[in-house]
Amino acid sequence: MPSARRRAGCERVRIDHRDFAEWRVMSKLAALGGTAAVPTNRRHVPWPLVQDEDRKAVLDALDGARLVSDTDGVNPVSALEEAWARRFGFEHCVAVSNGTAALSVALAALGVGPGDEVIVPALSFIATGLAPVHQMAVPVFADIDPVTFNIDPDDLERRITARTRAIIPVHLHGAPADMDRITEIARRHGLAVIEDAAQAPGATHRGRPVGGIGAAGAFSLQVSKNIPTCGEGGLLVTRDAELAEAMRRGRQFGEVIEAGRERDYISYGLGWNHKMNALQAAFTIAQLDRYDEYERARQHNVTEFLARLAQLPGLRVPTALPDTTHAWHILRFRFDPAAFGLDGVRPEALRGALRRLLRAEGVPMSQYQLMPLPDQKVFTDRAGFGSGYPWAVTGAPGTVAGEGYPVTRAVIADSLTLQKRHLHPEAGELLGLYADAFEKVWANRDMVATFAKAAS
């Protein structure tokens, strides 16, 4: 019979062996049969977070008598406009059907039309480039900053011509653009600035809320946004009362809708049917009431998450300019093969390997935006209103796929994004698991190298 000490020692060895075996399984990449860092039952995080107060707000609006914005008196749409302006410090707010409509209505209200050019960033959602085309104006694309992913002021200024009428800087992913430089350039050249703040409600630039710095600002309330509605919605903000009235006419067939004044059904100018309905507005008001609580949690969770990932070689985490507040709508990560220890490997190959391995671990990395805006067929084929319009109005050559925009192309080639999951106010623990997954993949850099080199 072995002694008690020996039996204890054997038991300790068995425990150590079990721990070691478990460690090997856990450290083995999930793509190769190991245990995923993020358990399957932890991966679903709802967004938007629909609470009882959201349901009640929608039902109350449904039971009300004012379901559209053109009814006389206070209605949920006008209540949302007032609440949004009050919360973020805007003087005037105009609700519309979606963020794309917001951009188009703003351009129209500022008089942008056929023969004009509008400078937009080469990296953005398609709506930023389409909005000028909706006004028969030509979108002119400028390259971006490699850190904030927003329009590069120097490249912007190089693209100004005698036909340029406006600039649409995008606060991409929630990071404020360099509004000091952009507004100074616009002032010198006599251009209007319309901020595309679709992804950036609550973001600030030197203490000022984005959207309220240029002539007008456009927000999206689409269901994936930081402050959502139950579907689609948009908001316009401005300091200019006359511009606000022009935008109200634009959303309502060119009509003038005033409290206490009977509707006359007269169009005083070109307009559209871009109204928001009461159910969308009521839902967003309820979400806005919880915004401060959600934002505090999101800032804490995302900051801690990015601090962990910033320690990993070859990984550049998202950041913002000094004196700005980032809204963290989307988190974009860039990967540097040389800093990762993979000289000579194409960025696309490393990006592809990391996407495969991280997704296997349960981190839903995606390649948001597959090409620069100027490479979209609607622009390269000049597929506007037929016969090459609006480009034919000015004789502008349009765009050629593959030309220019080196920073935009580099960012698309070497980056992946994380979306939606981190918006939930209780996502801190999940982000911790995501960080575990990143660290696990980086601990297996030899295997990452194997996958990346095979794809090069």
Image: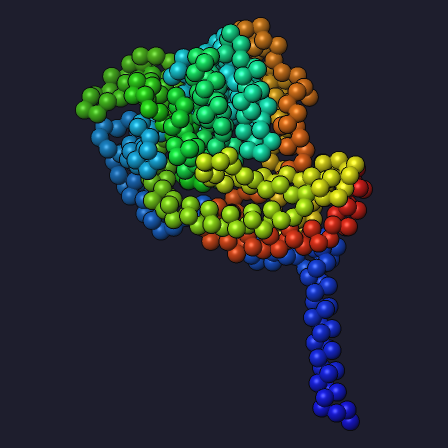
Disc tally is: 0
Rendered residue at 24%/22% (across/down):
258
- Residue 355 visible? The answer is no
Residue 314, by quadrant, is top right
Rendered residue at 70%/85% (across/down):
8
Rendered residue at 43%/32% (across/down):
205
Pick the residue in front: 94 or 275: 94
Q: Is residue 141 left or right of residue 218?
A: right
Q: Is residue 162 left or right of residue 105?
A: right
Is 382 drawn above or below residue 52 in the view shown? above
Pick the residue in front: 220 or 238: 238
Q: Is residue 182 left or right of residue 30?
A: left
Picture coordinates of residue 113, whole percent (x, y): 45, 11
Residue 287, by quadrant, is top left
Rendered residue at 21%/21% (across/down):
262
Give the quarter of the figure containing the C terminus.
top right
Is 160 drawn above or below residue 374 in the view shown? above
Query: Which color scheme did the rendering employ for the protein?
Result: rainbow
Picture coordinates of residue 82, whole percent (x, y): 29, 33
The residue positioned farthest toward the left in the image shown: 260
Give the quarter of the figure containing the N terminus.
bottom right
Pick the residue in front: 194 or 229: 194
- Residue 255 visible? The answer is yes
The residue positioned farthest toward the front in the image shown: 322
Is 245 drawn above or below residue 296 in the view shown? above
Picture coordinates of residue 292, whole percent (x, y): 37, 45
The residue positioned farthest toward the bottom in the image shown: 1
Picture coordinates of residue 109, whole percent (x, y): 38, 17
